[in-house]
Amino acid sequence: MSNPTALFANALVSTGAITVNVEEPFRWTSGILAPIYVDCRSVLGFPEQRKSLVEGLAELIETRIRVQSFDVVVGGATAGIPMASLLAEHFEKPLAYVRKEAKGHGKSKQIEGADVKGKRVLLFDELVSRGSSVSTFVPALRDAGAIVHHFVALLSYDTADLRKTVDSIGVTMHHLLTLEEALAAASMTDSDRAEVDRFRAATLT
């Protein structure tokens, strides 16, 4: 694999996971109007690209974390669950998922699937921007008795806010791609790319 970063970035872009529209910007959940929109769940509908990204994530985990250092793979609900399932299958590990809050009915559980009490957990989510989800998921897992040292994302915005959040909750973050690396593979005019770069410099630092 001569340039794995470019391969993974192309896998995201070719599935429509990254959309750029300078003329009609997207409104993010935060209310920000942005010329880019990222939805890594698009990858799920493309077997070849999905396989490539899962293999890349598996190699990253094997190299940086080691399979022997975790007992359970946990996906962040909801977007992180599908690929967490594929990774758990790949590594032949138990699988669980964690919600942002406990259900308001039934057993009122926040964590479903494998028992995480006393287990070393590998947390996975498909996208991480400022770290708000991680700062919810990790305490919930630790409250349930899990040992959480590592968090893996398919795509990271790699912002200063994110790094600060991750450091504050005491986990090591790993990502397959940064937003900058993914955008490098996107087809844009020079003026659109300049606008995207201005937005990132002003908002995602």
Image (spheres, grey):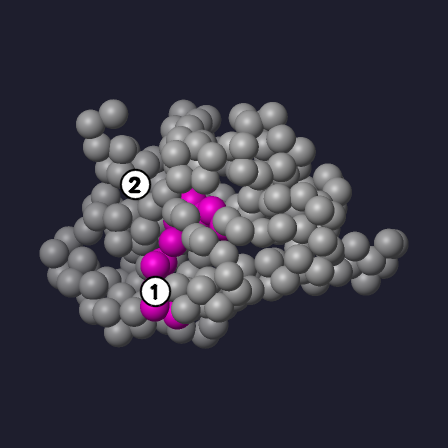
Is residue 166 something that shows in the picture? Answer: yes
Q: CA distance from mark 2 to mark 1?
A: 18 Å
Crowdedness near tag 1: few (<14), some (14–19) or many (≥20) residues, C-alpha within 10 Å: some
| Residue matched to label 1 | 159
Q: Nearer the viewer, residue 59 or 25?
A: 59
**Vertical arrangement, residue 71 with respect to residue 172, above or below:** above
Disc 1 on helix, strand or loop? Answer: loop
In the image, what residue type sits under mark 2?
Ala
Q: State the residue at coordinates (66%, 57%).
A: 142
Q: For residue 164, which quarter of the picture?
A: bottom left
| Residue matched to label 2 | 9
Q: Nearer the viewer, residue 130 or 151?
A: 151
- Where's the N terminus, which quadrant? top left
Q: For residue 58, which quarter of the picture?
A: top left
Q: State the residue at coordinates (50%, 49%).
A: 150
Residue extent of the magenta highlight: 151-161
**Vertical arrangement, residue 131 with respect to residue 98, above or below:** below
Would you say residue 65 sits in the magenta stretch?
no
